[in-house]
Structures are given as C-alpha cells and as structure tokens.
Amino acid sequence: MTKTRKRSRFLAFLKWTGISVAALAGLALVLNLTTGMHLQITGGLMPQLDFHHEDRHYRAIETHREQSSDVAPAVSTAPLETAADEPDDEAVLEAEQTEAPESGLDPATPSPGSWPYYRGVHMDGRYPQPINTAWPNEGPPELWRIPVGGGYASFVVGDGLAYTIEQRRKQEVVAAYDLLTGVERWSASWDARFQESMGGDGPRATPALYEGTLVALGATGELQALDAATGASIWRTNILEDSGATNLTWGMAASPAILDGAVLTAPGGPNGAVIAYELETGAIRWRALNAQGAYTAPAVFTLDGLSQIVLIGADQVVGLAEDGSETYWSRPWATMNGINAAQPLQVAPNRIFVSSGYGHGAAVLEVDADLEANTASVKEIWFNNRMKNTFSTSVFHDGYVYGLDNGILACVDAETGDRMWKGGRYGHGQLLLASGHLLITTERGQLVLVRATPESHQEVAALPAVSGRTWNNPAIAEGILLVRNDREAVAFDIRPQT
C-alpha cells in the first residue's frame, strides 16, 4: 500500500471519527435538553447516568407551592401528641443509654421537639427521645412528600416548623415548612448560584436556629439572619469577604452554630479562619486563626473540664478558646486537597474522635487541660485506617463508633481503635442514632434501620425514601424523621407506639 493511500485512509478515519463524535455529542445534548440525561458523580467518584430535567423540576416546585398556598392550614406550633404519652420503661432506658457528653452550644437546654443545629442539639447525630423501631414491611407511616430545590443542606426544627436552604434557579432560598404537613410557610431568597460539576449545584450548609432567629449560610459565603416566624431579614454579610478568603472547591459547607449569643462560622482565610458574629446585629465579635478552611462546622466541647471550640481545617485539628483569644492546642490532620468534611465527635470526657476519607483514616485524641493556667495539650491515643468518613460523620454509642468507612458501615471500639465488624454497602450516605439504632440514608436514597451493637451488622429494615443521589443529613424532631436530597423531601412518623 502506497503512502498516499495510507494517508487517505487515515484522513478518512479521522473524518469518520469526527462525524461520529459530533453525532454522539449532538445526541447527548438533545437527550440532556429533553430528558435531563447527564453523567453524575457519586461519592466513590464513579459516574452514573442520571435523568433530572432542572427547568421542569423548578416549574414543578413553583406549581406545587402555588397550589399548596391556596389550602394552607394554620401554622402548627404546639408539640405533637405521641401515640404513647408515657413511653414504657424499656424505651426510656434505651434512650438514656445513648447519652453522651453535651456540647456547650446555645441553647444548653433546648425546647422539647427542637433540632436546632446540623446533626441535632449537640451536633453529634443523636436523637435523645425514644422512637418506634418496630417498622412494618412498608416502613414507617409517611406524613408528606414534596419537591424541593437543589443543594445538600439538612433541616433544623423549632416551634412546629422545619427549615432548610435550597437552590431554586439563580437564587438560594431559605424555606420554612410545616412539620406536620410539609406546607411551605415562608421563603426568603437572594441572588446566588454555586455550580460545581462533580458535587453539583446549590448550598451545602445547614441553618442554625436559636430563640426565634434562623441563621443560614449559602455556598458562596452569604450569611443571613432571618426572623424564624416570618423570614424577614435581620442582617446579612459575606463570610468570605470578611475573612479575605477565596471559596473552596466544593463551596462553603461548614454549618453555623450559636455560642454565647454569637454565630460561629469557619470560612478559612487570612483574616479569620473562624469568625464569630453577634447574633442580634451581625457585627464581628472576634476572629481567630490564619488557616485554610475545610468543610466541617465549628464544634464546642468540654474536654478535661475546659470548654473549647474544636475545628478541623484543611490540614489540622485545633482547640480554640470560646472567645477566640487563643489556640489551646493543634494537631496535624492533612488529607488529599484538604478534604476534611466529617465532624469531630466526643467519645470521653477528655477525648475526641476524628476521621477523614480519601485514603486517610481515624484517630482518637486526648486533651489534657490545666484549668488554672487556662492551657491544654493534646496527644494521639490511636490512629488507623479502619474508619474513613468521606463526608458523612460517625455516631458514638456505649463505647463504640459507628460510621460509613468509605461507604461501608463499620463499628470501631473507641478505646482501642479495633474494628468490631464491617458490613452494609450504603454508599456515601448519612446516619443518626436513636433508641439504640442507626437510621441511615444511603447514597441512593434508601432509608435503613440498623441495630447499634458491636456484636455484628444487624439490619432491621430498609425502604426507598427519596429518588436520586442523597448526600443530605436526615433530621428528627418530635418523633418526625425528615429526609431530603436535591429533589424532594419526605417526612416519616417514627413516634413510639403503645
């Protein structure tokens, strides 16, 4: 074969390949526009086909809200009546056994039925009241199901309203829903749209609720305090602008918390990796640290008698004075690209558990405090790779840590770091602890109930909850379990039965 013929065939191949690629690209574009078909990344970085037509979804939300507003009943603010006014002794004992060291977050004694922060009253993923764990085959009763906007925030609950933050078209929207009916009571919005091809669009941080004020953080750093009853704006700022930081790859995800009348935020940056704002006015009370931020929220623990703010940044774990005036201790905690997303967890009066995924691992750190000198030091008790929390946080129960080790449920002895068992491929979902059981939302939107026991993996029930990739934390208040993702939200009745 002559060189001329070889060259002609090669050029013909290139032309055919170009036409084929163009045709496939054109087909993919048509399918995207008509069906919403696109490749979606899961927590394990494996792409999968997903069919979600964004514009149609937004129109469905708008239609649903218009229709539901016409028949909206009065806001329910009274606590829900449970099927059993007085739970039996066994249920009470089971709930008491889940008690853990309490954080110093406000309020120290929350009102009954509230779920004021990301992952609950103490940000530890524990629901302190008994729940019904004897589910029928079809699962617990479903109270309501509604379409919601994009993003990965969870719910907070107070006075009969459930609050979250969503992406709707080109705006971030804070919405208040009736806990019993799912009817939207009010919404407040601002222009902002965070877009990221791997993680998806929308806000990531869960709001915080305290004494009639709701504080919400958007993915681009917009921080707003709103009247919890009406949604009226009280004050606003941008934490990235205040800290002099650029946004993180996957957006602002560190949920705010309230400590001593101040809003704790963790933007990272040279002008305050942690910034505390006055809850009433939004004025900056204090700034601390010059460090790169990560995706974890500031937590408040009393460790060895010393109350402190514990934060996991991009490359370290630190303990700060409650007024930000000094750093008590720090410990290196560097991961790939600074991806730390799981919350620290208190497992003893002077110990915390920390974990990160992407090939890193877990450790228990012990804090030794000198209360007279107002100082503290830290040492590592153990470190291993038997619990790698990618972006879900573990829970602690009766001496054991339960969590998703790179997507597989596992149980680890908090004292020794020994793994007791590993089983249950739930993907990069989320979990809570209630009545000696784990309530897990899987990455594919299933709701799973598992006994929290070090003996073995014991799955009690599993059912579909929401459709599509589910990275949002569930929430529980007044015996109502709230599950959402970037498309829909559903409420299940898990109140104890007689």
Image (cartoon, rainbow, N blue to C red):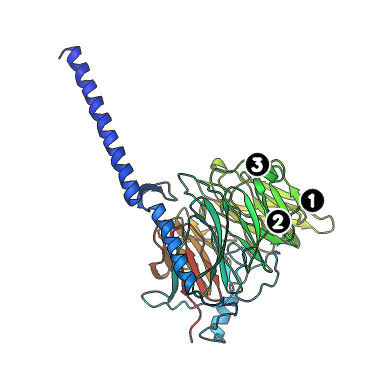
Q: Which mark is residue 245?
A: 3
Write down the quadrant of residue 26 in the picture. top left
- What is the crowding at mark 1: few (fewer than 14 residues within 10 Å), some, or many (at least 20)? few
Q: Which mark is residue 325?
A: 1
Give the mark toward the camera: 1 or 3. 3
Q: Which comes sooner in the sequence, label 1 or label 2?
A: 2
Q: Is residue 312 visible?
A: yes
Q: Amino acid at mark 3?
A: Ala
Q: Amino acid at mark 2?
A: Ile
Q: Which residue is depicted at the point 71% across and 56% down?
A: 309
Residue 476 image point, x, y percent = 54, 70
Please say if 432 is above or below 27: below
Circle 1/circle 2 CB separation < 8 Å: no
Q: Secondary structure at mark 3?
A: loop
Q: Amino acid at mark 1?
A: Ser
Q: Which comes sooner in the sequence, label 2 or label 3?
A: 3
Q: Which mark is residue 293?
A: none
Q: Is residue 451 visible?
A: no
Residue 43 image point, x, y percent = 45, 50
* Quarter of the image with the N terminus in it: top left
Q: CA distance from mark 1 to mark 2?
A: 11 Å
Q: Which residue is nearer to you in this view: 195 or 429?
A: 195
For label 2, the residue is 309
Q: Which residue is depicted at the point 41% across and 53% down?
A: 55
Q: CA distance from mark 1 to mark 3?
A: 21 Å
Instruction: Using residue 14 as the reference point, say whether residue 496 is left or right of it.
Output: right
Outermost residue, left direction? Answer: 1
Give the mark toward the camera: 2 or 3. 3
Residue 18 image point, x, y percent = 27, 29
- What is the crowding at mark 3: few (fewer than 14 residues within 10 Å), some, or many (at least 20)? many
